[in-house]
Image: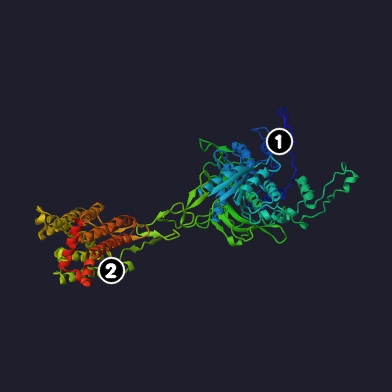
Amino acid sequence: MKQQVFFNERPPMTSCNNFYYESYQHLQTVIFAIQEINSNPNILTNISLGFQAYDACNNLQQSMQGTFQVLTGRSTAIPNYRCTGNVPLSAVIGPSASTQSVIMAHILGLHRFPQISHFSTSPLLSDNNKFPSFFRTVPSDTFQSEGIVQMVLDFGWKWVGILGVNNDYGQQGIQWVKQEIVKAGACVAFTENIITSQPDRNAPRIVQVMKESTAMVVIIFASDLNVIPILDEMLLRRISKKIFVASEAWSTSTLFNMEKYSGFLIGTLGLAIPLGTIPGLKGFLNKVHPSMTSGGSWAKLLWEKSFKCKYLDVKNVTMSTYTDIKPCTGEETLESIQNNYNDVSHLRGTYNIYIAVYVLSRALEDLKSCKKEKGLFVLGKCADILTFKPWQAFSKCSLEKPVNKLLNYLKKVKVKLSDSRELYFDRNRNPPAVYDIINWQLGLNGTVRHVNVGSYDTSALLGQVFTINTSAIVWGTEDQQIPVSVCSQSCLPGFRKAPKRGEPVCCFQCVPCPQGEISNQTDSISCTKCPWDQWPNPQKSQCLPKPLEYLSFGDPMGFAIMTGSITSSLVPACILRLFIKHKSTPIVKANNYTLSCILLVSLSLCFLCAMAFVGYPQPVMCLLRQIMFGMVFALCISCILSKTIMVVCAFMATKPGSNLIKWTMPWVSYIIVSICSLVQFLLCITWLSFVPPFPELNTESQPRIITAECNEGSPIAFWCMLGYLGLLATISFIAAFLARRLPDSFNEAKFITFSMLAFLSVWVSYIPASLSARGKYTVAMEIFAILSSSWSLVICMFVPKCFIIMFRPDRNSRDNLIRKSRDKFIVTK
């Protein structure tokens, strides 16, 4: 139940209930350093340092009260007065917590009273305007945040949670780490505050958030006391498989029962203040005894906690109480035990407070020596250090603001450390940022081992600022592999990251690269288009040269076309020879011998022109191949059209009173062939004159292949040429169809009808086939149409005649033709 506080009375005093070995070790280290300096004849000769110790119980009210007590010399605060004037007061060392340091620095800074903290790391304290007299021997959390982020990114952790205690230290830690993580391209899964005003530190909510999150790594900015409730709650809910990244406030803590928390803390990484050595400190610590006149009450608390005994007040304790409590005799020795108080094997914060005393003594030595530097004099001469009063020792060397003499010397002080490094203060009064990287491992006896596995040193050479030995790290996983903490699994090469709507950038989905594009890196944010002459491999991880495709003579299809074209061209030649041999026979004469010969020659050329479409497209062949095809087929169809017209005119001329006899003369057929061929010739010449065909490398029709082909220049011209052939064939087909019932002596009309029907069918089918084909198959479709239509003319026009000539010579007679013609005429009459 909370204690009620009324504003009409003084608030209750804070009681200190806990005794910490580390805090008492810090106090004794200050005493040890002061005695060491006083006994050194080379430092502050004839001057002895003293100290006042104040226990603030880690409480803000106590810290403020202690600050005023230091300034005024009394327990009651009297601002701007010091009631004890016989003892010079130089500086304040401490406290360790950032929140308390902020409160004290505001007050001490008003008087430019030097304050040196050994463990306050808040970046707020680097503000020269707000805290002009604050120094520290520990780096600012700004550097710690950068080191933590560097470590997180080094292990590939891009999805992390952050916990911070609800004070300046925790909130600033959350803010700086989150800022650096986002700047580096990683993401924060959650941020939660550890509320110190609640006994359980808000642990149930925090653990629930950690359980629901997919983040495997949790960064914690808090003290060890604030972390323990969270671990207890995790133990209660049996939550494991989280890797903790510890801030320096608890990265080397010894308060944890490793046997109890081993499932959570093994593998923990953290940044820690570098180790230091203080010779003779252990012996000094073990000499502490409750009988000391100064600080004896604190020594009694140490004795009671170390030896689990109690100093009894005989007046107030009954005899029955003695049986339950082990009394302290004072004869116990600290050498016989080992605890965190007299353990000097890992001096971190303790070494910082030791250095703080030496920093102050070096500044006082410089002040005593009175180095003649600008702004360090009072009334033109050195001040007496024995009468040193910080709030009175100002000189008007600057018209803007006064300068404290000791403060200026502190800014320039340099102290050699045990590891040969040098401590000095930058313009923000921060020391060089150096951290050890600590890994929590389980020792043989079940205790925690803080193993140094690397370092983060901002003063090191480029490339050596962050170093870590991953092989020395022990992880809390079964396979001992680096844990993975990402919101989404990495996108392999061939994929790109696509953000998910309403989620952080680290949560994405992997989308395959579009056609023609690649990504050759993991987690690529975009895909790169391949050059025009390259195409992605099946994995879309690299661009490969596109194969060059064209209908070559070495290609099986090209070889078959070449063979078929040459072989087919011999058939009309053989028929022509047969017609020449039997040119005097009635069947040859009846079918217009001259036109038949021209037709057979053109058909032979039709077969041969198909070869012009095979092979690598050359400029000359691109110009001529369609022209050759158009002209020979125009000549061929013109001959057939002429034959059809001549058949109709010859039949019509036999009717009484007809004057069409003159249109049956041979010169008429030649004129028809010439005119029809001339029209096609003019179309071709116009085509070549304005938009001639040309060779090109086509990457559009087949993106994966470069097709070497002839660009027709003008598709309209090509289809006009082909359409003209269709027009001639259609006229021939209609005329022949109408004349199909003429007497048998003129029965060539039947063959023309079938040949034109086949010719038109082939080329009508070619249109959709040509539009759907790609690459070399487009050329193959045109060649197939050429050969097919040519064969249809050969078969329909000449095969029946050749059959009669060769195998039925009895039907190749004038009497047979006249008789059939007469019979046909009588029947039709």
| Image x and y of residue 165, in percent | 64, 43
Split into 4 quadrants, where in the image is the C terminus? bottom left
Label 1 sits on residue: 74
Looking at the picture, the colour scheme in use is rainbow
Please, is residue 742 above or below residue 805 in the view?
Answer: above
Please, is residue 165 above or below residue 720 in the view?
Answer: above
| Mark toward the viewer: 1 or 2 | 2
* Comes first in the chain, label 1 or label 2: 1
Please state the total of marks drawn on the protein image: 2
Give the left or right position of residue 458, taking residue 225 as reference.
left
CA–CA distance between discs 1 and 2? 120 Å
In the rendered structure, find residue 564 and report the number of the disc placed on it.
2
Split into 4 quadrants, where in the image is the N terminus? top right
Q: Which residue lies furthest to the top in this view?
A: 8
Amino acid type of the residue tagged 1 in the rendering: Arg
| Image x and y of residue 289, in percent | 78, 51
Of 268 and 788, the residue lying toward us: 788
| Image x and y of residue 38, in percent | 67, 50
Of 545 and 135, the residue lying toward us: 545
Amino acid type of the residue tagged 2 in the rendering: Gly
Task: Give the SS element for disc 2.
Answer: helix
Please, is residue 61 above or below residue 594 in the view?
Answer: above
